[in-house]
Image (cartoon, grey):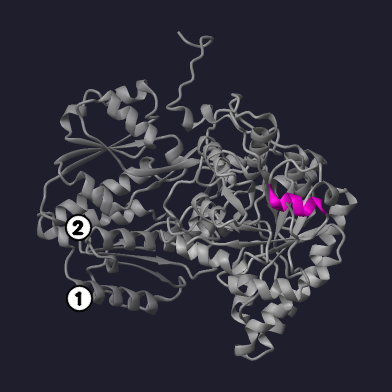
Amino acid sequence: MSDVKTPSKLEKVLASGHQAVTSECGPPRGSDAGEIRNKAEMIRDHVDAVNITDNQTSVTRLCSLASCIHLKSMGIEPVLQMVVRDRNRIALQSDILGAASFDICNILCLSGDHQAFGDNAQGQNVFDIDSMQLIQTVRRMRDEGRFLGGDEIHRPPRMFVGAAANPFADPFEIRVPRLAKKVAAGAEFIQTQCIYNLEKFEQWMAQARDRGLHEKVAILAGVTPLKSAGMAKYMKNRVPGMDVPDEVVKRMSGVAKEKQAQEGIDICVETIQRLKEVEGVRGFHVMAIEWEQKVPEIVERSGLHPRPELD
Amino acid sequence: MRLQYPGSVRIVSVPCTGKVDLIHIMRAFEKGADGVYVLGCMEGECRYESGNLRARKRVDKARDLLERIGIGGERVAMYNLSSSEAPRFVAYAREMTERIKKLGPNPIKATSKKHKAAGAGAA
Amino acid sequence: MIVAKPKPVEEVIESVSGFDRILLVGCNECVTVCEAGGRKEVGVLASALRMHFMNQGRNVQIDEVTLERQCDREYLEEIRNRIDQYGAVLSLACGVGVQFMAETYFQTPVLPGVDTCFMGVTEERGLWSERCQGCGQCVLARTGGICPVSRCAKRLFNGPCGGSTRGKCELSKDLECAWQLIIDRLTELGRLDDYEELAPIKDWSTERAGGPRRVEREDVRQ
């Protein structure tokens, strides 16, 4: 594992050839760190790293950086999610250094949902740089040891740099070029949007392989267990950029209400099992939204447990 | 056919209701009209294609504005009829006159001494 | 052009209600084209205000004038000889005109009659949409002639984001995704390969971020 560039456990797991498992926790809408600790505690033995969302859907929450610090103090490896919606380049670089000072060594660079969806729809947004440029910024800070302004950084951040990819958003013809762009910007791992349309995802992966992108970046397939038929319909119809095929909605609706949660987990496990065989899928990002307690079951049944012990 | 329509209605002729602008309706009220209605051709039968549709939008706008400034939106209306329908012409004139009688005089006349003609119509 | 929309009449009434003599001043440029503050709109608003105050039993003098422009001193001068007759000016020009009027007639309260919205186009009568935010450093050559600053809700330079669905922005089904438009146009121009060029981080100092801006050109200055 001589080619790792950071102290990131996630990077090491991937470099050692294992399929990685990450999950994510949303911070609370209050200052009780216990909530984030409890969520993380439920999944700590079943994942390599835990993403902490950054005011997802633009709803104000306890900040990602502080939550990551809580995880770090528990000995859990965090992935700092950072959106460019709320901070300009000064604040972004400053927070990256803040995270680095706690030896947080994974970052996921995102645009962020528009604030119109959140609890402060009348607020300003920043978008000083975009997610692609945030990737470049972190890489520059790490690899060149320089700020965007050109000045040298004393003790540069050592971060494994990730980005999101949505294989399902439109226009489909630029989905792979867009991935290529993120790779060119410096992304080292990718966590995808939740996958329900396996055919479309496999088509995207095939195109990515055609360009050799799967060798340049570690693609973690995103999965989210559906809790109910209602959630399936909501995701299908209401969540931008989400592709839930009719068969999935039908399958969820086809079982009794009290059994739908289990059906959702079954679908999730089957998805992972099928995608494990897809060349270029280097791991999974299990996003069990406010359902962290189910992550162990999903990971175990998918044959991804125990997680490798590396040092 | 000699049909009687209310004498309080004053007719202002225009070549097409599309000629009626918001300002004409406003000025009529400013000069003391108690109500204004626009009589246009049947929808879809405008000789200039959309004159009567434009008029309807302006009438709607006038209703909204007059309501907001406290004069009363109900004092404005638009009716459509064919040129040969004299009985309907009379019916609309009566209907509008009745409506305005119920609403009472243009409120600005209570404060300004300018009592002008009671109504103005356009066809 | 600069696109504005009329303020609700109630708001205008409230802002002018403390004055007995008011001059409504229209502008013959952009706000005339977008039917918010030209001669016609001045006439209708003046009439509405007169009736409103008459109805309240108040004798308020409301006069009307429409200037060729309110963003040039020479046209603002046209009302200098009568400005002292009025307690306030209600300008139906864009925010630029309102301010220049206020600067020109320092002792007269100048109130806005329209809400200034954006620089945009008339897509059709009654429908205007934004095209430019005046960032001071045009990038249209790189983006197929479609502006990511003014037309992408996140002003992404390397879009689209994951929220683009069937060509529409995640904000609204009525809003085109700027990056879909850019990609469509690059495709049409046979330049889709340009899409993969990473757009450099933008210098926003020429935009609002750099503070109030001015353009100074010695070649045309007198």
The residue closer to the viewer here, B63 or A285, is A285
- Ranked by sequence position, the earlier of labels 2 and 1 is 2
From where the camera sits, is residue B16 visible? no
Residue A307 locus on image (x, y percent): 73, 64
The residue closer to the viewer here, A93 or C190, is A93
Q: Are marks 2 and 1 on the same chain?
A: yes
Q: Amino acid at mark 1?
A: Lys
The answer to whether residue A12 is magenta is yes
State the mark number for residue B32.
Answer: 2
Q: Residue at x 29, y 52 (%)?
A: C9
Q: Residue at x 45, y 8 (%)?
A: C222
Q: Amino acid at mark 2?
A: Gly
Q: Residue A166 occupies which quadrant of the picture? A: bottom right
The chain that hosts pointer 1 is B
Q: Which residues are magenta?
A: A8-16
The residue closer to the viewer here, C156 or B66, is C156
